[in-house]
Amino acid sequence: MTTIESRRCWIGSALAAQDEPAPARKVDAHVAAALRSYGEQTWPHGAVRAGLPLGRLELAGLKAGECDFAPPAPWVRRYADAAGAPIVMIEAVVAVDIASAHEQLGAWLASRTDPTPAPTCKTQGVEAGEIGFVGLSRPQRIAWIAFARGNVAVRVLCLDPRVDPHPDMPGIARTIDQAILAVPPLGKATAPPRPAFERLLPDRTSCTVGDLVVLDLAVRDPAGGDPQLRFVVAGPGQGYVEADASGRQVLHTTGAGAITLCVQACGALGTVAEATTRIEVAAR
Amino acid sequence: MMTNGATVKDARELGTARRACDDSRCTQVSRPKGLTGTATVDKNAVALKDPSPCGSRRRKENPHMADPGALRGLTLSLVLAWPVFAQSELDATPLSLQLTAESCPRVVDPKLSGAAVDVSYVLAPVSAPFMTTITLRQGGCVVTTLWSGCEFAGDGPCVHAWNGRDAAGAYVPPGAYTVHVECVPHGSPQVLTVDYPLDVVRLGIRAMAWSGPKEWQMVYFKMGALYAFFATPALHEYFATADAGDLADLDLNSGMPRPAPAPHAGLASPPLEGANYEDDNYNFPLCYVAGSTPTLTVTFGSACTNGSAAVAAGYPLLGMPIRCHADESNGTRWTGIADIAIPGGTAEYRGPPQRLDVGRQELAIRWSWEYSPDGGATWAPIPGYFDTQHRVYTILGAPRFASGASGSQYAGPWVEVVDDLHVWRSALGIDTSNAHGVVEALIKGFAGQIGPLPTAIEGVLYDTNVLGGDGGASHYYVGSVVQLSRLLDAHSNGVFVNCSDCAASTATMLSMLGVANVQLQRLGSMTLRAIRGIGAPSYTLLLWGSAFPHGFSYHHIITRNGGAEVSDACLWVDEDGNPNALPGLPGYNVDRPWNAPQIGYMGLAAANQVTFTLEAIPGLQ
């Protein structure tokens, strides 16, 4: 999930900070212009939901790949044909509210360089979301469908619309939309729950380059799944994190200097939280 | 064990002549050119006549042999001048029958490449036949026989090469040995002997850390099939050591030397060991600013194997320091700042300045060792060498990234980006020793369809429905970041790209190559003239098809001087003098003036006045 970081996935500077209020909203001027030109003020508002179960989403006749979780980029999953060639990509953003989901939709529209506006889903007979738009390729070919259903923004892309057989883009969008609708609505003004860091404790806070630092890490996913984790090692120190044979996450230090280790967790419904810890890595 | 066949080979290599005698094992070896030595007969040293592996007969020992350590300490100068603790039974030997020591290496590592131990001695008189046995002994016990057979005295020394292995084919472990040469004149009961002290050691390098103020770690963006950033380890970019279950760092468990890892040739993913990163055997590419001087710290290995267990490397030797040299294949010797080799210790070298342009080079370093018999006053070579290969990239200056960005993807230039640039500038023959050349190589290489580059980068196409795409939506530029990793990974976000994808990608690529002041330049709406989009087969005046206006709602390009000159890999302008008509003449946009008569980007690309704003380079994924 993401787009406007302050609203979609607020980044805490420490474990305890994950419950602090988000900073004020600021919309990119080009996105704001796109929203105006596409009449965003008239777009219907649906319900806020906890997210989209993208990791469990199956598409008929296609083979699902791993979820690609890399904030601030949208949450992504690619689907391949029977031969294993990826042909469809789903991008999803589980925003904190409906306005932020609309902003994501606006960002996708604002990226178009074609001066002719993209047609709406409704005009193309695509049933997905409360509001949506279509990117047209050659006649009878849909290159992408972008829509918002409540606080969830989705863009489904055909990775190469020239290739036959062309995927059933309206059907895929409808399947995604139904998966969103299957998640119970939350109360008004209720933000979708994010994963919660219960522990992020390195077994030491200083070490010598080359040392391994074991992380005591516990993250709870409100959706009940195992959160997908991503480790961002910020320097000047260097290293990487990988699981050892017993499943523990271990930081391998490979360069001297302070490391700010940011752990990002994506829940099963696409909400994101993160926590950081700092480790001083001395030279040998 | 040395065989007659091997001796023949060695004799030929040394330019020697030989002839058969009655005994088919007999050879006569002439003195090879350039092989000299001074032999001194030590009358205190009396030959052993004991052919048994571990002599039990009463004998008179060379006093030096009783304590090899003391021997090394006492006879360093003698060692260098072809040491002889040998003897001949002078009283009983006719003057015409002589065995004189010639040469034998004092310190050897048989596991180094080209490390044959040449044992040489002189027999006299010419044409006299001898039965010779050369054995390796330790503490008086025969470890193995190096060579035995009949040979004739020639007008030069007899030379026999030993490969460091015992009769079973296994390398002898490090330690202090004696090479014992025993010659029996044909038809005589007399025995002539020579002993050479020999220290077998195990030399080698287990880690190399490249450094210097202008050295940068390099970045990979995949981990197998997943997207994950990995910076090459600053701790050591080259590592060849014991994995779990291995006995020693320098050798395999079989006793064979551990091979040097080849430079990792992958561009997207570092080497993996199962599902994890390879952490004990790798050789990562290196990156320096063009023209800078690398510093290299090597860590020597500390243990080897004898085929069944780990054993120490057999040095340092008392009073005989060992030093290590690094020589490039062109003969350039790296300056040894601290070059003494100690097991587990480090040495440091400074190399020559790197190439002056942006690109890639393959660097071969030959490591060789010397020992000093006199505590550092003079040095003698240890036979053999160890070769390592390294891939070195050069960039224009310090890599630049989005302000405040953090993560491993910002540790340095991406391997695939610098390699792409090298391929492009090589294919197009562009000088990349300055920023303009780097921009030209990158813009033209990214766009492709020029010279030997048949397609755009990763085969992408401009995102117009005429080509099969749609309305020019971004696929890789997602607001605050550009997903360059997905673009470089066979365009995994789709084959179509728009101007923002191209501008954000080229801006970040140039910046990580050290080009300064690169910015995105966002243009307002444009009424287009004839253009050719990236990947398109030809120029067009109908970018979106006949039913739609030929224009852009906005366009993204790049600049490195605040908009005065611009570069654009996404489209070519038409330079045939009539930019409003087809066909077009390719006009590449490399540092093209923004607004200049005839050649300005704005006038060639658009029929209207175009506004612009400048934007910082985005973050990277």
Image (cartoon, coloured by chain):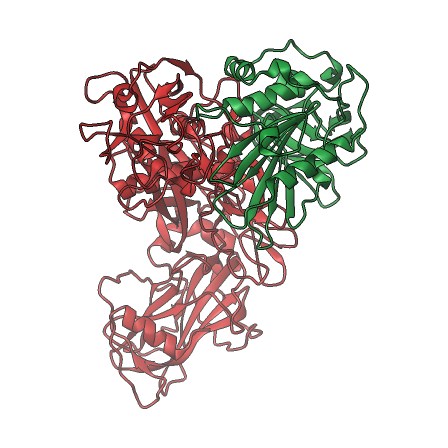
Chain colours: A green, B red
* Res B144 visible: yes
| Res A177 → quadrant | top right
How many numbered marks, from 0 up?
0
| Res B458 → quadrant | top left
Nearer to me, B118 or A274 = A274
| Res B119 → quadrant | bottom left
Residue B605 lies left or right of residue B339; in this view the side is left
Q: Residue furthest top?
A: A24
Residue at the image position 59 percent from the left and 55 percent from the top:
B311
Q: Position of residue A34 (x, y in %)?
A: 52, 17
Q: Position of residue B170 (x, y in %)?
A: 53, 68
Residue A266, compared with residue B311, is above or below; it is above
* Res B209 visible: no
Residue B172, compared with residue A282, is above or below; it is below
Q: Quadrant of the N terminus of chain A?
A: top right
Nearer to me, B594 or A98 = A98
Q: Position of residue A244 (x, y in %)?
A: 70, 42
Q: Quadrant of the C terminus of chain A?
A: top right
Q: Residue furthest bottom?
A: B22
Residue A152 lies left or right of residue B569; in this view the side is right
Q: Position of residue B221 (x, y in %)?
A: 52, 37
Residue at the image position 71 percent from the left and 41 percent from the top:
A57
Nearer to me, B200 or B208 = B208
Residue at the image position 72 percent from the left and 11 percent from the top:
A21
